[in-house]
Amino acid sequence: MSPFQPPWDDFREVVRRAVIEDMPHGDPTGALVGARPAAARLVAREAGTLAGLVAAQIVLDQVSERLGTGPAEARPGVEDGARAEAGQVLCGLSGPADTLLAAERSILNLVTHLSGVATATAAFVSAVAGTLTVVRDTRKTLPGLRAVEKYAVRCGGGTNHRLGLSDAILVKDNHVAAFGGVRGAVEAALRASGPALPVEVEVDSLSELDEALAAGAHLVLVDNMSLEETREAVRRARGAGAKVEASGGITLANARAVAECGVDFIAAGALTHSARALDIGLDWEHL
């Protein structure tokens, strides 16, 4: 069982849609093989951090139910959040051949994508190790996959920003433009939020930062600032008792330099929207 509190309901819904999408009218090719006993293994083709193995059994159960084939079993040998090496066996699968064959692609799609997110996150976390900066995600996720992608970020050692718009007030550049200025937008947000919702404001310059701090922002997001500007933003924010998050143009190559400016958080949309799938295969075993 993964220690990272999987969002079980979201996994079930994601799998339900995936299975319907992949076999709207059954699996005639797998049916040719039939229900003969079979076994397979998920094997890492490259090293990386794992996420999504917890969903393998959900896929098998839903495939079996949809096709009316016999039940199959997934036996993960490692937990989500663990690092796997190339060639490592991650999970054993056993059951009727037609069930395993029909479930193969849905299992691999989930595990390779989510493990890619976890691996990308782990790389960012490693890049800032030894600083006090926390790596966290954004809302730049694939529609319908947000909860499971954010779970994968946690598996990689990162933390989650808000799950959705309802979870916090984040005044961004277009909110500022609609309001006509940073200070007015922040003051309105603070009046509306009360103690229930934190207020964060995105700023593009040190002058906007000063406006946000003067209005009482709890957290400022400095967007696409130079390292020199970021260091000065941290200095000013500390004096006002506010925290600083950096975003925009942050890559593995410059993440540590940004962290060393003293920011509390680095927000990286690339953790979810640009993560490369981890290479994991399903190898059939001959009984």
Image (cartoon, rainbow, N blue to C red):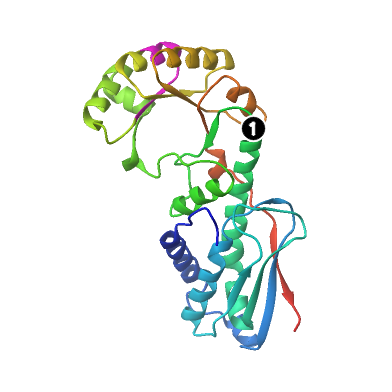
Where residue 140 appears, as percent x and y from the top left, is 47, 42
Residue type indicated by callout 1: Ala
Q: How many marks?
A: 1
**CA neighbours of label 1 inside 10 A, class few (<14), some (14 to 19), many (20+):** few
Name the element at disc 1. Answer: loop
Residue at x 59%, y 23% (from the top left corner): 258
Q: Is residue 181 visible?
A: no
Vertical relation: 219 (above or below) 56: above
Q: Is residue 14 visible?
A: yes
Residue 203 falls inside the magenta stretch: yes
Q: Quadrant of the N terminus?
A: bottom right
The image quadrant that residue 86 belongs to is bottom right
Which residue is at the front of the view, 102 or 123? Answer: 123
Where residue 257 appears, as percent x and y from the top left, is 63, 23
The image quadrant that residue 79 belongs to is bottom right
Where residue 179 appears, as percent x and y from the top left, is 27, 23
Vertical relation: 272 (above or below) 177: below
Which residue is at the front of the view, 279 or 31? Answer: 279
Residue 276 falls inside the magenta stretch: no
Q: Quadrant of the C terminus?
A: bottom right
The image quadrant that residue 94 belongs to is bottom right
In the rendered image, the residue lying farthest to the left is 191
Residue at x 61%, y 21% (from the top left corner): 260
Would you say 193 lies left or right of 117 here? left
Vertical relation: 65 (above or below) 88: below
Q: Which residue is mark 1?
A: 129
Vertical relation: 249 (above or below) 60: above
Residue at x 53%, y 85% (from the top left corner): 69
Region in magenta: 199-210
